[in-house]
Image: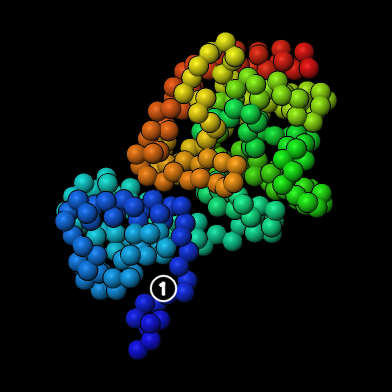
Amino acid sequence: MTDRDRDPDRGKTVSTVLARRLGGELLRMREASGMRQPHAAEVLSASVSKVAKMERGGVPMRDPDIRALCHLYGETDEAVVERLLKLARTDRERRKAKGWWNQYPQLSAMVEYVALEDIATSIRNWELAFIPGLLQTPDYARAVAVGAGSWEDPSEIEPFVEARLTRQARLQSERPLALWAVIHEGALRQLVGGRDVMREQLGHLLDVAALDTVQLQVVPFLAGASPGMIGAFSIVSFAEAGALDVVHMDVPSSTLWLESEEDAARHGRIFDRIARVGLAERKALDLIDAIRKET
């Protein structure tokens, strides 16, 4: 018998954000129960290496396996079990997706985020320096790409802009994505692409704010210090907000995912505090319009 016969998942393990979240929760449950990986392997009729891959988020998980592990670990709260099952199903959906983003190699650094965005139900986005990508005009997105200097070949910028516009279609699709965007006033005043580009971008914000799927706030300079000063982030939700969330952050050299339930809850509280110091939507739109007229 070969290694592949003993472990049918050998050679095709792909770690995903959602699977790592699920595996981490099952790992914590196992350790809290005093069980070891061989106990889990026995109840699943699987190898210990398979259990290790599951806990690292390297393989998709079946519903019967999750129920069996929850029973082994003494988890009797059906709401907890259902949340884990929902997480596993969402991960399987993500793995099977052959999305439009695969035709854009320019999205290689963002492919995991874009794929998750495509199956998400809502996003809470706090931005310090940029207009959120889902709300950018083509010229603004193009200017951001040029300014970032990420492409040696300028011809790669146009597919990047096209992909960004394709992402925006979710806001008005048959299964719409709900976006709650909180933007710092500084991002509204930064002349990305020049005055004409910014006037168009600010006007676009006023237009998209009318969509039922978009909630828009602005944190003004006068708000002073806030927890949002630590940096921008997005909370991606796959059920009602707070039930199944992961946090995404961009750092200079990579993309950072915060996958634990504790991290997601902590950033949810931070986002709520940022929103509380932000202007209510009507006042936010008045400020955006005033800045547009000044630009």
Report the side of 77 relative to 271 (left or right): left
At a point 64% along the width and 55% down the height, the residue shown is: 108
Instruction: Locate the N terminus and report the quarter of the image it occupies.
Output: bottom left
250 or 8, which lies in front? 250
- The quadrant in which residue 269 appears is top left
Give residue 253's position: percent from left, percent from top: 59, 46
Query: What is the image's colouring?
Result: rainbow
> What kind of residue is marked 1?
Asp
As drawn, the residue found furthest toward the front would be 253
249 or 98, which lies in front? 249
- Mark 1 surroundings: few (<14), some (14-19) or many (≥20) residues within 10 A: some
Report the side of 232 relative to 292 (left or right): left
Give residue 155's position: percent from left, percent from top: 82, 51
Give residue 96's position: percent from left, percent from top: 51, 62
- The quadrant in which residue 242 appears is top left
When the figure is inspected, residue 110 is found, relative to residue 213, above or below; the finding is below
* Label 1 residue SS: loop
At a point 55% along the width and 46% down the height, the residue shown is: 255
Whether residue 123 appears in this view of the structure is no
Q: Which residue is tagged 1?
A: 9
Give residue 221's position: percent from left, percent from top: 59, 14
At a point 44% along the width and 25% down the height, the residue shown is: 272
Whether residue 284 appears in this view of the structure is yes
At a point 46% along the width and 28% down the height, the residue shown is: 271
How many labels were placed on the picture? 1
As drawn, the residue found furthest toward the bottom would be 1
48 or 292, which lies in front? 48
- The quadrant in which residue 57 appears is bottom left
Instruction: Locate the C terminus and report the quarter of the image it occupies.
Output: top right
239 or 33, which lies in front? 33
When the figure is inspected, residue 259 is found, relative to residue 291, above or below; the finding is below
